[in-house]
């Protein structure tokens, strides 16, 4: 009988700790951090949304997109993102990579097919196409491309928008970010912000 009572008492104590931890760490703490974030950095807390002019916004109704999420598209007037394996492409509800190994025939075929498409679209040899142009990111939502991928798209974007190549190259340079903290990763170009800059220059 004493053993049953001790088991009951210990189970009840464990349940109380579980409930307290759930309320504290699962409800109150996230609400506190979210509240602090919305007060101290509302733009980032709202998802880093920007309008069609490139201005920061916290309104979904005014947003042209998020600087944190790539967008699928096939408008020849704009710069293309890298491929995406998330759902039908850049689906935030299906964030994932292809999970195909480097020697998987399906991945090799997909890369070769993408190379042919890009080579024809940008009028460049396959050897000039950088790796990020034909491979998806691990999340499938990468909003950035390499400066090399942006560079081979410059002539097409300039031509389709009636802009000079020099103007578009300047926009790419202005949209190119260096290595985070000077040492991490590689230089990158945010495609959404670059495309907004192109659209503004074209009008």
Image: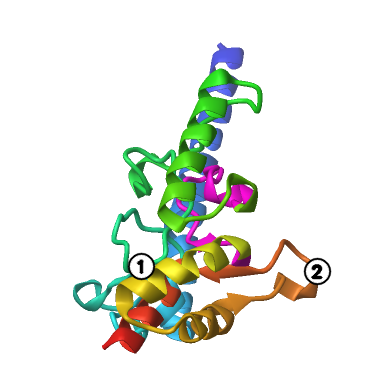
The image position of residue 106, as x and y in percent, is: 51, 22
Q: Is residue 169 magenta?
A: no
Give the residue furthest to the top. Answer: 1
Which residue is found at the position 28% from the left and 80% from the top?
Answer: 52
Give the residue furthest to the right. Answer: 183
The image position of residue 29, as x and y in percent, is: 49, 62
The residue tagged 1 is 78
The N terminus: image quadrant: top right
The image position of residue 4, as x and y in percent, is: 55, 14
Magenta segment main secondary structure:
loop
SS at badge 1: loop
- Discs 2, 1 touching: Cβ within 8 Å: no
Which residue is found at the position 57% from the left and 27% from the top?
Answer: 108
Q: Return the residue nearer the eye: 131 or 183.
A: 131
Q: CA distance from mark 2 to mark 1?
A: 30 Å
- Residue 130 left/right relative to 115: right
Image quarter of residue 79: bottom left
The residue tagged 2 is 183
Task: Check residue 163 in the rendering and tell me which mark sits there, or answer none.
Answer: none
In magenta, the rendered stretch is 129-147
Q: Return the residue nearer the eye: 47 or 145.
A: 145
């Amino acid at each position: 009988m004493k053993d049953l009572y001790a088991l009951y008492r210990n189970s009840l104590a464990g349940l109380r700790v579980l409930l307290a931890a759930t309320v504290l760490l699962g409800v109150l703490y996230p609400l506190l951090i979210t509240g602090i974030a919305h007060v101290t950095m509302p733009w980032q807390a709202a998802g880093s949304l920007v309008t069609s002019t490139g201005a920061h916004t916290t309104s979904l109704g005014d947003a042209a997109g998020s600087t944190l999420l790539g967008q699928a598209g096939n408008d020849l007037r704009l710069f293309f993102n890298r491929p995406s394996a998330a759902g039908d492409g850049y689906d935030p509800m299906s964030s994932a990579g292809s999970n195909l190994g480097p020697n998987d025939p399906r991945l090799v075929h997909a890369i070769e097919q993408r190379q042919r498409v890009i080579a024809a679209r940008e009028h460049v040899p396959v050897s000039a196409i950088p790796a990020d142009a034909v491979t998806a990111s691990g999340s499938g939502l990468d909003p950035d491309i390499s400066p090399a991928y942006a560079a081979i798209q410059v002539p097409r974007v300039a031509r389709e928008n009636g802009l000079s190549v020099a103007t578009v190259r300047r926009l790419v340079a202005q949209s190119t970010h260096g290595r985070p903290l000077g040492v991490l990763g590689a230089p990158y170009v945010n495609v959404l912000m670059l495309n907004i800059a192109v659209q503004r220059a074209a009008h």
